[in-house]
Image (cartoon, rainbow, N blue to C red):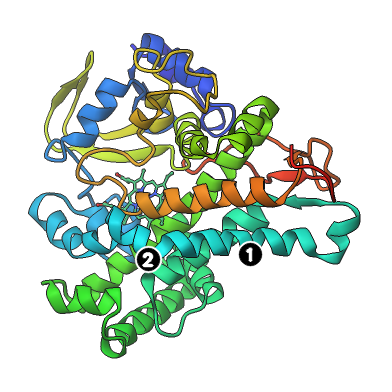
Amino acid sequence: MYPVGASITLDDLAGDVHPHLARLRATEPVSWLPALGGWLVTDRTSALEVLRDAATYTVDDPRFSTAQVVGPSMLSTDGDEHTRHRAPFASPFQQAAVREGFEDWTGSTARQLVETLATRPEKRAAPRADLRSELAGPLAVAAIARALGLVDADPDRVLGWYRAIVVGVEGVNAGLEVGDDTRRAVADLRAEVDRTVREAAGSMLAGVAGESSLTADEVFSNTAVLMFGAIETSEGMTANALAHLLTDPDQTDAVRSDRSLVAGAVEESLRMEPAATLVDRYTTVDVVLGDALIPAGDLVTVSLAGANRDPEVFLEPDRYDVRRDNARLQLAFVKGPHVCLGLHLARLQTIAAVDAVLNLLPNVHLDHASRNGGFEPARGLVFRKPARVPVRWSASGNVR
Ligand code: HEM
């Protein structure tokens, strides 16, 4: 019934996925994939239908692992309950608030990180760096640490909690119990959230706790989800954007000489390779989607990468074009009730990182022959990014 879907393996989805998604979209845009134990949606119209209809395609299902580790949150609820969880966090993440609180900060933090990597003594002789581990990752952690405003948590502590919670969620996905390290991290983060609510009047979390009906448990679970949702994805978004841009010297030059193109370059990268590429829902009723009849209770996975290269919407979808005029139609942050809460903050970070790299690293280009392994394209089943973004630049001389 779904021969292309039946032929696709988890390795295909984690590796060079785009040709497989193109094949699916052309013949079975809503397909049953035994490898996923669910349906995979690869055309943009059906993707939007799923993402916008939370009554039919829900996240409120015990099979979701995040809720098992941190408790129910906006990520695992729908309808009125979802609104109750999400609304108190909405205003600090609105565009104007994020600009005011973060525009200067992301600019100066990205600049500092690039200055640091460029001026280390060993870099002066042979200027090279990995922009994923030395820029994208640290910027992502510092941004969410600052946004959460925990009283006594520096970025390293935040990263430690994040890593332990990821291990817990992955373990639950693999059928394991939540381990001791994860429990300890959850308890530590919980204590820190409670302390911030008590002691930091004026902080985001004290505001949320004071003005909403959320219990202390719920303030904690949503804080954990904010942290969980921010780190891997923002690192991937920045790494992917730098990799796409620096792969193509003509487009690098175009953006370098016209900085109004940076936002478009970032948007186009989100279209080409959304950092979180699969999102899951469960059907609440029997439903027809495209040509497929999907029974109640089935897993429906939306391929955001598939939707983002739908040729019905995007001309020559496999071409990276910083001037594409409809790149904003990409679905990397999804649409509908679960649209990413951090999208304005995430965009600011990546734009700041691209600007800092172009400003401070003359003639920067991807290093295809790095000693630690050259550049390899993004990979990953759910979260996609390159393992490294190795670059070189000129120690001195004109910026290209
Ligand atoms: C500052 C950084 C970020 C923060 C604080 C953040 C936070 C969140 C939160 C809290 C949600 C849940 C919203 C809800 O369920 O109502 C969410 C959803 C989502 N975010 Fe983000 N996020 C960030 C960055 C990113 C980035 C960089 C990407 C990808 C490029 C991304 C992709 C998504 C997606 C796909 C969803 C929807 C999940 C679903 O519908 O199942 N996020 N984000």
Q: Is residue 73 above or below residue 279?
A: below
**71 or 52, which is in the foreground?**
52
Measured as percent of width and height from the top left, residue 6 is found at: 43, 19
User: Disc 2 beta carbon < 8 A from ligand 1?
Assistant: no
Earlier-in-chain disc, 2 versus 1: 2
Measured as percent of width and height from the top left, residue 180 is found at: 47, 75
Measured as percent of width and height from the top left, residue 89 is found at: 23, 63
Q: Which part of the image, by quadrant, shows the C terminus? A: top right
Which secondary structure, mark 2? helix
Please give the residue where the numbered disc 1 appears in the rendered image: 112
Residue sitting at 40 percent across and 77 percent down? 189
Horizontally, is 7 left or right of 302 in the view?
A: right
Please give the residue where the numbered disc 2 appears in the rendered image: 101
- The quarter of the picture where residue 207 lies is bottom left
Q: Which part of the image, by quadrant, shows the N terminus? A: top left
Horizontally, is 305 left or right of 372 in the view?
A: left
Q: Amino acid at mark 1?
A: Gln
**184 or 197, which is in the foreground?**
197
Residue sitting at 76 percent across and 40 percent down? 363
Which secondary structure, mark 1? helix
